[in-house]
Structures are given as structure tokens and as C-alpha cells.
Image (tube, rainbow, N blue to C red):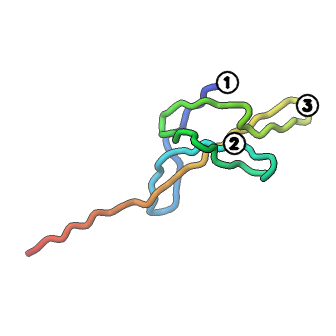
Amino acid sequence: MGRRGHSPAAAEGEPQQVFLYWVMQKWDETQGKYVDIPDAPHVFPGDTFDVLKENAKMTVTEWEDEEHTIVKKATCGAVLTARRRVNG
């Protein structure tokens, strides 16, 4: 087990979209990029979550220190607008 993280309130999305939740990602060495963690629960604003070292990208600094980086991907959705027809 790693440390506990705290989710920020939200992320900025495209115009006409609203922030929904964070998706936890892990570093995939083979693909050379962060990928979604299958079956990981969505992280909503204000939630806490486990930070696992095995999901982080590890790099060694020039001082031989290890740095571990985790990533959360913001998920946004379209803003829905309700229209009501008024007779009259």
C-alpha cells in the first residue's frame, strides 16, 4: 500500500462540457504512456484514494533519488440543456 491522495475539486474541460470524475491511471512501460487502471473506482471531487507505488512511473534524478509520478485523467461530459415548449 502507498499513500493517500486527495482529489482536487475539478478540472477544466472543453467548452460546453462539465467535469464528471477522475479516472486513475498507471504507467505502462511497454506502451510508454499512462493507461486507465481497469476496474479502478472513479474518483469524485473531494474523495481520497490510495496512491500505489506500482502504478507510478519511476525515474531516477541526477542525485540518484527516486521520483514516482501518478496520473489522474479528468473525465468530462456534455452539458445537457433542457428545452420546454410553451403553448400560447
Sequence order check, earlier mark of 3 and 2 = 2
Q: Quadrant of residue 55?
A: top right
The vertical placement of 31 against 8, above or below, is below
Per the rendering, the mark at residue 1 is 1
Per the rendering, the mark at residue 26 is 2
The vertical placement of 81 against 30, above or below, is below
Which residue is the extreme one toward the bottom? 88
Could you say which is closer to the camera, residue 40 or residue 12?
Answer: 40
The vertical placement of 44 against 81, above or below, is above
Residue 14 horizontal/vertical position (percent): 52, 61
Mark 3 surroundings: few (<14), some (14-19) or many (≥20) residues within 10 A: few
Mark 1 surroundings: few (<14), some (14-19) or many (≥20) residues within 10 A: few
Callout 3: SS: loop
User: Mark 1 near mark 2, Cβ–Cβ under 8 Å?
Assistant: no
Q: CA distance from mark 1 to mark 2?
A: 15 Å
Callout 2: SS: strand
Q: CA distance from mark 3 to mark 2?
A: 25 Å
Residue under label 3, please give it: 63
Could you say which is closer to the camera, residue 63 or residue 50?
Answer: 50
Could you say which is closer to the camera, residue 72 or residue 11?
Answer: 72
